[in-house]
Structures are given as structure tokens and as C-alpha cells.
Image (cartoon, helix red, strand yellow):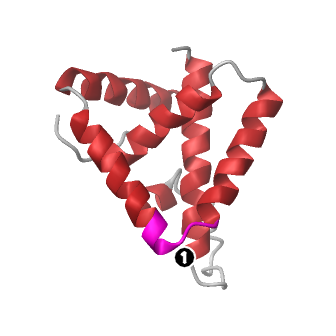
Amino acid sequence: MSLSKLTLAAVAASLLATAAYADSTPAAAPPGGGGMMGGHGGMMRGMFTPEERMMLFVDAAKATAGMTDDQKHAYRQQQREHFMGMSDADRTAMKADLDKRWAALTPQQQADIKTKVQAFMASRGMPAPQGGSQ
């Protein structure tokens, strides 16, 4: 999988998490400008486990493979809107599905995904995902 596809997948996953976090936060922004962009995916870390985020990364990469930039943008927007419209029960079910699919992967598949995610994040100067079995 090319680095550009991995990049897009991570961006799509970030948008999904950002939408969910925005939906669950109070209307007032915290003082000091601690807005949505601060912390490189902090919202996603609060909502999803590292393994769930990696599965979102994989899903986005598969879904956007072969798309033009405009199609990828439209996909990210559609995913964000879909996620924002989910009920708490739907989000819980989605997380359970991500967990189940991660657990079904072989240790080698899990390691390969972790390596791809870490390479993507390192290329963007983002902290590596924490947690999960090594």
C-alpha cells in the first residue's frame, strides 16, 4: 500500500474521531484555544483504543484505494457526517465490531498494521500509538 493511501486513510479516521468528539463536547470551547486541532488526534485517543484506531485506518485505506483526491475528500466528509449522526448505541456497536475484527487478525497482521500506522505517524511528526499487545 502506498504512503499516500495510508496518509489518506489516517486522515479519514481522524475525521471520524473528530466528528464523534465534537458531538460529545460542550458547546463552549475551553479557554486558551485548546480547540479541535491541538494535540494531533487527541480526540481520537479519547474515543477509540489504539487497536480500534488502527482498524479505522485500515478501513479508510481500503475504502479510498484508487480514488481521486476529490473522491477521497467526499468520502471523508460522508464518513464524518455518518459518524456524527450515530447514536451512542451505534457507536458502541461500531467499537465492538472494530475490537472483534482486530482480535480476529493474526499477530503478524496486527504487527504489520502497527508498523504502517507508526510509519505514517512518524512521517507527520505525530506521537506513536500507545497501548495494545506487542
Decide: is 128 above or below 20: above
Q: Using the rendered image of the protein, determine whether residue 49 is visible from the camera's viewpoint.
A: no
Q: Position of residue 128 (x, y in %)?
A: 37, 39
Decide: is 103 above or below 1: below
- Of residues 82 and 52, which is closer to you in this image? 82
Examine the structure image and report whether residue 89 is included in the region drawn in magenta.
yes
- Of residues 83 and 7, which is closer to you in this image? 83
In this view, the residue farthest toward the top is 2
Decide: is 28 above or below 59: below
Seen at 62% across and 81% down, the residue is 31
Q: Position of residue 119 (x, y in %)?
A: 43, 25
Q: Secondary structure at mark 1?
A: helix
- Residue type beneath disc 1: Ser
Seen at 47% across and 65% down, the residue is 90
Q: Using the rendered image of the protein, determine whether residue 112 is visible from the camera's viewpoint.
A: yes
Quarter assignment of residue 133: top left
Q: Is residue 109 left or right of residue 26?
A: left
Seen at 47% across and 73% down, the residue is 88
| Magenta stretch bounds | 85-90
Examine the structure image and report whether residue 106 is included in the region drawn in magenta.
no
Circle 1: is it few (<14), some (14-19), or many (20+) Cα within 10 Å? Answer: few
Q: Which quarter of the image is occupied by the C terminus?
A: top left
Q: Position of residue 100 (x, y in %)?
A: 28, 46
> In this figure, which residue is indicated by the disc labeled 1?
24
Quarter assignment of residue 113: top left
Q: Is residue 54 left or right of residue 70?
A: left
Q: Position of residue 41 (x, y in %)?
A: 51, 52
Seen at 54% across and 56% down, the residue is 17
